[in-house]
Image (tube, coloured by chain):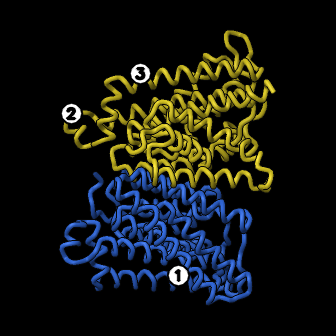
Chain colours: A yellow, B blue
């Protein structure tokens, strides 16, 4: 029971980090990305690869995962953030599809379809963290740091520029804001922390493969942000808790066929997204209308 | 010979992509609705045809059901989802999310009803014949290509010469002006959804008979349609058409150099290159900003 709860806690922390980072670019900068699972995945593969081949020290794995994910986000941002929002949606979708192919085919780095197996647990100053309860504490700290970073960013000058861009890009540009630069930096920060979540995830599960980083995951993270409340601080965490508890909640409904639970869950969050947009576009914790 | 074979397959794929992409482009260009559930319309149309055909009612009832299903679905989404959202605030984001949600629901409902594995309708038309030495073509491929060109040609004539067609083209430029000329933007937007949704039907039926269907197929169709709309230039029907043919050919000709699992990646490499090189699209109509 203790392990079960710790396990759920770890997953909630990891997905909350992902939802917070996506919310930052979606809710505050108005950048609509369908490729968030790619940054998560790149962090996970980088962390896993380093832990398997070099060192599993937290001081090696987390910075490396963050730098790699941020660097990749620049490749996406530089050509696409200069143009209109629809282009970014298409390009991020494209990146998501390309990345799944790469994750599957780039065998020496990602282990191909089989994935990376037997990733050693993360070590903090020589102590290996392998028990779910202690790992939960590590992810809790990571979540707290993430909340603090984005809380500060949102309240800072930078955050005000972001909201100005979201509300009117041309007005912000007219006030002398360097819109593409601000957007690129926010995407890089968001990707870096998603990469950190990936490295933690890989170390915790000790096994990763491409299935965790496909379009479905990007959609799941997006659903967490939207259902919880876009552009709010607590919304993404609420969304992560609700959507991660959904599978076990559904499995209590005995009359549903067990084999369809995954599909029923997807239907619930798909319908949830649509209905929220109709009746409460701000999400569960949002203020009703935007 | 292999290159010729792949070119022929590519042209067929391109023609079918063009139909779905042009539908998306027409809806997006004239109503500014980012209709992500267009892929769901495709899946629905394909499975309706499959269900009627597999139950033994034959081709024509299948065709009619498929058309009816696609058109009703498109109209219903426009009426019950997009309009109420746009009445409050027309933000791109809100409409897109709602549309995305519908896509997820349809894909999973179809998965529950029909199962998640591939299904195909067998037809003698799919049996390949040797056209030249080493070049095989199924009669269905030729029929699909011709039907697609006829549909696209008819659409072109409709947009150029009818009052509604001209209205649709004008709608993206200036909705106010359209109202001044006595056309209702609401009726025109309904027309865009009817035509756009109907255009997926031939493509859906040919796909169900040749490569087969699974519930996730709408994703692939949506990706190609979206990429073709962007590469072709938002609001440009000819541009979208050309881009769709380029994608069909690229996907198939890439097999000359790459393994088949890379073909989707090739499409998106082209998309990236196009966004960098010509952000306003092949056939520039409205500027990128």
Q: Residue at x 26, y 77 (%)?
A: B183
Residue A230 placement, left or right of B207: left
User: Do pointers 3 and 1 mark residues of a single chain?
Assistant: no
Chain letter for mark 3, please. A
In terms of image quadrants, where is residue A144?
Answer: top right
Determine which of the numbered discs, if any, sits on residue B172 in the image.
none
Residue A234 visible to the viewer: yes
Q: Mark 3 = which residue? A: A152
**At 71% across and 79% down in the image, what residue appears?**
B121
Q: Is residue A171 above or below residue B59?
A: above
Marks 1 and 2: which is nearer the front? 2
Cα gap from disc 1 to disc 2, whole angstroms: 52 Å
Left or right of B231? Residue B223 is right
* Residue drawn at the location 19% of the way across and 38% of the way down: A174
Q: Which residue is mark 1?
A: B145
Measuring from the top left, give residue A112's x and y in whole percent: 71, 44
Give whichever of A239, A36 is nearer the camera. Answer: A239
Query: Could you say whether the residue bearing mark 2 is in a helix, strand or loop?
Result: loop
| C-alpha distance separating marks 3 and 2 | 23 Å
Name the disc covering residue A176, or none. Answer: 2
Disc 2: host chain: A
**Residue B162 x %, y %:** 29, 85
| Left or right: B268, with A142 as reference point | left
Q: Would you call the spot at circle 1 few (<14 residues within 10 Å), some (14-19), or many (20 or more)?
A: many
Camera-side residue: B97 or A60? B97
Q: Is residue B12 above or below residue A34?
A: below
Q: Nearer the viewer, residue B155 or A290?
A: A290
Disc on the earlier residue, 3 or 2? 3
Q: Residues within 10 Å of mark 2 (few under 14, many from 20)?
A: few
């Amino acid at each position: 029971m203790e392990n079960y709860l710790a396990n759920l806690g770890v997953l909630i922390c990891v997905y909350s980090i992902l939802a917070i980072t996506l919310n930052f670019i979606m809710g505050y900068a108005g950048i609509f990305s369908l490729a968030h699972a790619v940054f998560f995945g790149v962090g996970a593969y980088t962390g896993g690869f380093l832990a398997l081949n070099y060192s599993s020290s937290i001081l090696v794995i987390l910075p490396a995962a963050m730098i790699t994910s941020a660097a990749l986000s620049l490749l996406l941002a530089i050509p696409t953030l200069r143009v209109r929002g629809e282009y970014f949606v298409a390009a991020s979708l494209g990146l998501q599809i390309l990345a799944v192919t790469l994750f599957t085919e780039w065998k020496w780095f990602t282990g191909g379809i089989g994935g990376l197996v037997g990733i050693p647990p993360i070590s903090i100053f020589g102590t290996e963290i392998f028990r779910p309860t202690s790992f939960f504490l590590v992810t809790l700290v990571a979540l707290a740091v993430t909340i603090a970073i984005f809380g500060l960013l949102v309240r800072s000058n930078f955050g005000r520029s972001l909201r100005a861009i979201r509300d009117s890009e041309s007005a912000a540009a007219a006030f002398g804001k360097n819109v593409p630069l601000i957007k690129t930096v926010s995407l890089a920060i968001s990707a870096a922390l998603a990469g950190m979540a990936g490295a933690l995830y890989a170390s915790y599960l000790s096994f990763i493969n491409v299935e965790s980083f496909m379009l479905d995951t990007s959609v799941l993270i997006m659903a967490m942000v939207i259902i919880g409340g876009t552009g709010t601080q607590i919304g993404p965490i609420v969304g992560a808790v609700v959507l991660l508890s959904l599978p076990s909640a559904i499995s209590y409904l005995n009359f549903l066929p067990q084999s369809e639970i995954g599909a029923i869950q997807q239907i619930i969050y798909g319908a949830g997204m649509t209905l929220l947009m109709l009746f409460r576009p701000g999400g569960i914790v949002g203020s009703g209308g935007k | 010979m292999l290159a010729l074979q792949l070119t022929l397959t590519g042209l067929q794929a391109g023609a079918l992509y063009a139909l779905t992409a042009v539908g998306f482009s027409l809806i997006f260009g004239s109503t500014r609705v980012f209709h992500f559930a267009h892929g769901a319309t495709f899946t629905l149309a394909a499975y309706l045809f499959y269900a009627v055909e597999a139950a033994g009612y034959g081709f024509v009832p299948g065709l009619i059901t498929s058309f009816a299903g696609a058109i009703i679905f498109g109209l219903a989404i426009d009426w019950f989802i997009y309009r109420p959202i746009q009445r409050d605030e027309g933000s791109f984001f809100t409409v897109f999310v709602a549309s995305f949600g519908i896509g997820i629901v349809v894909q999973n409902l179809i998965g529950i009803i029909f199962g998640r594995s591939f299904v195909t309708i067998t037809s003698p038309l799919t049996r390949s014949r040797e056209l030249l030495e080493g070049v095989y073509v199924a009669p269905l491929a030729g029929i699909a290509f011709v039907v697609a060109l006829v549909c696209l040609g008819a659409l072109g004539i409709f947009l150029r010469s009818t009052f509604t067609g001209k209205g649709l083209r004008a709608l993206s430029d200036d909705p106010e002006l359209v109202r001044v000329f006595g056309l209702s933007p609401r009726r025109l937007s309904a027309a865009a959804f009817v035509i756009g949704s109907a255009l997926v039907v031939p493509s859906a039926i040919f796909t169900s008979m040749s490569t087969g269907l699974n519930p996730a197929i709408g994703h692939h169709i949506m990706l190609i349609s979206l990429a073709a709309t962007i590469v072709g230039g938002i609001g440009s029907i000819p541009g979208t058409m050309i881009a769709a043919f380029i994608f069909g050919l690229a996907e198939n000709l890439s097999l000359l150099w790459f393994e088949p699992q890379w073909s989707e990646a090739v499409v998106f490499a082209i998309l990236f290159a196009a966004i960098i090189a010509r952000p306003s699209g092949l056939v520039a109509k409205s500027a990128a900003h």
